[in-house]
Image: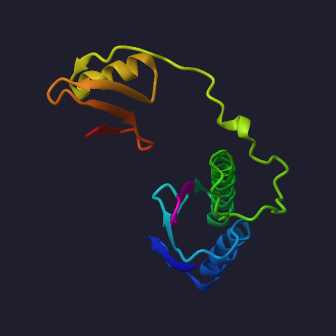
Amino acid sequence: MNYNVRGENIEVTPAIREYVEKKVAKLERYFTETPEANVNVNLRFNQDKTSKVEVTIPLPQLVLRAEETNDDMYAGIDLIIDKLERQIRKHKTKVNRKFREKGDFVNMFTTSVESSDSHEFEEDDLELVRTKRFDLKPMDSEEAILQMNMLGHNFYVFTNANTHQTNVVYKRKDGRYGLIEAH
């Protein structure tokens, strides 16, 4: 794996770079062979003295991505690795089930991984527990945001009155709003 470690408002010292590389390298145990991938790590110190760690690893069948905000940069890196391990286990379970059904499985993941986490990802974690059906009312994005806030949700699906396409408005972590447009 190729590491690209960037810092914003922080100098990436050799100690931090080594710590990141050592921790991310632990993910290699989940794969049958070490993937050729670029590991993009962004470290940032915010004005409120918290640190934000973002890791993106684009792989052929999936993109691993996680971010964590923490008072301690090293603790944030540890939490990111936990999140990425959960993503890998989740994807591995999903892929294994899908290819077992089809019968044309090319094994990308190892079958035995000793995990420090006693809770392994179970197929039941992907169980769909509720389905909602509703008519999408035509409206603009501002009205959709008002509806979302009135319902106390963090996203809202609607039909855009101008384009007649299905859109989603959502509340971002920074408190502002985003819009997803379907094409």
Q: Residue furthest bottom?
A: 14
In the picture, residue 162 is in which quadrant?
Answer: top left
Q: Is residue 13 above or below residue 55?
A: below
Residue at 69 percent of width and 68 percent of height? 31
**Residue at left 21%, top 25%?**
140
Location of the C terminus by quadrant is top left
Image spot of residue 72 (x, y percent): 64, 61
Q: Is residue 136 left or right of residue 49?
A: left
Which range is magenta?
57-68
Asked if residue 48 lies in the magenta stretch, the reply is: no
Q: Nearer the viewer, residue 74 or 180?
A: 180
- Residue 59 on the magenta span: yes
Does 142 sit left or right of 60 as displayed?
left
Give the main secondary structure of the magenta stretch. Answer: strand
The quarter of the image holding the N terminus is bottom right
Residue 5, image x and y in percent?
Answer: 51, 76
Above-or-below relation of 181 to 22: above
